[in-house]
Image (cartoon, helix red, strand yellow):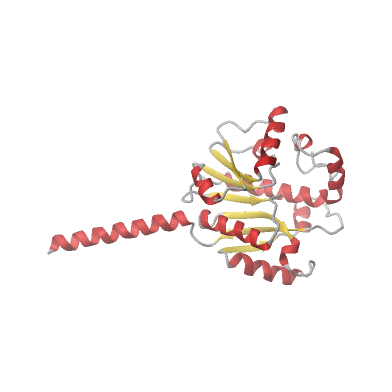
Amino acid sequence: MCNAYAEPLFVDPYAGCLVPPDVQMDLKKYSHHYCLTTKFIDDKLLRTVNHMDGLKQVVLLTDGMDTRPYRLNWPTSTIIFDISPERIFKISAEKLEGVGAKIPRSCLFLHVPLESSNIQQALRAKGFNGNRPSVWAIQGLPVMTLASFEDVLLLVGSLAMNKCLFLGELPAWLAETEFGNKSTTEKWMDKLFMSNGFGVGMVSYKEVASSLGKELAPGYYKNILFLAEQLRFSDDQMDTWRRELQRVEEEGDEEGFEEL
């Protein structure tokens, strides 16, 4: 349960088996922002997949301890892919199984190790389809350098269909600016995301809190909350378009030959 507020924003019956009590105490000073972020991502994910027809694809970039696949009410025919460190994921999966956590019926949960030499290929091998809608969320994924986050943008940009959403948190220090200068950070975000084919907006923690009828606790928080939209076509969409164009050209050549 998220106890940052008198009335919790969400209930997580499984977090206790994953995070030791001493670590939970250390996290309390960040809990307000963390709970707001988690609730924001939860709501956006569910709202998005509930507007998808047929197969629904959700990709979570996590620390290996994300309980969303178990605690959220996913609609039928949802496939959830978790990209995270393999060792942590396996330990977490065993603990979750031990407390009876289960994936909703008619849904599928698949793990892709963060250490995979080719995550795009690994996702496709698990069944991800770049010609179908998907929604992507990042929270907790170890991002050590700007280059590693650019790799994430490249991954999402290559696989997500046009107009698909990518949301979540990134470390504030990636902005390479003095955090707190919102206009400078926004310009940096726009440049970074647009260079990878995304339109992006920073999401205000204060506005998220207000929308939920809460007040934001004072204090510094080390992450930036964002919501981005894919402006390009996925690699699979482009391949489909090229094949269709080739087919039309070949049919045109055949018709011209018959006229001769």
Q: Quadrant of the N terminus?
A: top right
Query: With respect to residue 84, does 249 lie above or below?
Result: below
4 left or right of 244 in image: right
Q: For residue 14, what is the image quadrant?
A: top right
Q: Nearer the viewer, residue 209 or 158?
A: 158
Residue at the image point whose x is 24% and y is 58% from the top: 251
Residue at the image point whose x is 54% and y is 51% from the top: 118
- In this rendering, the count of numbered labels is 0
Q: Nearer the viewer, residue 92 or 160?
A: 92
Residue 28, given in percent of the width and then of the height, sits at 86, 47
The extreme left residue here reads 260
Residue at the image point whose x is 84% and y is 45% from the top: 5
Query: With respect to residue 97, does 67 lie above or below?
Result: below
Q: For residue 71, what is the image quadrant?
A: top right
Residue 196, given in percent of the width and then of the height, sits at 57, 64
Residue 91, given in percent of the width and then of the height, sits at 70, 36
Residue 137, given in percent of the width and then of the height, sits at 64, 50
Residue at the image point whose x is 55% and y is 40% from the top: 79
Query: With respect to residue 128, does 241 lie above or below?
Result: below
Q: Quadrant of the C terminus?
A: bottom left
240 left or right of 81 in image: left
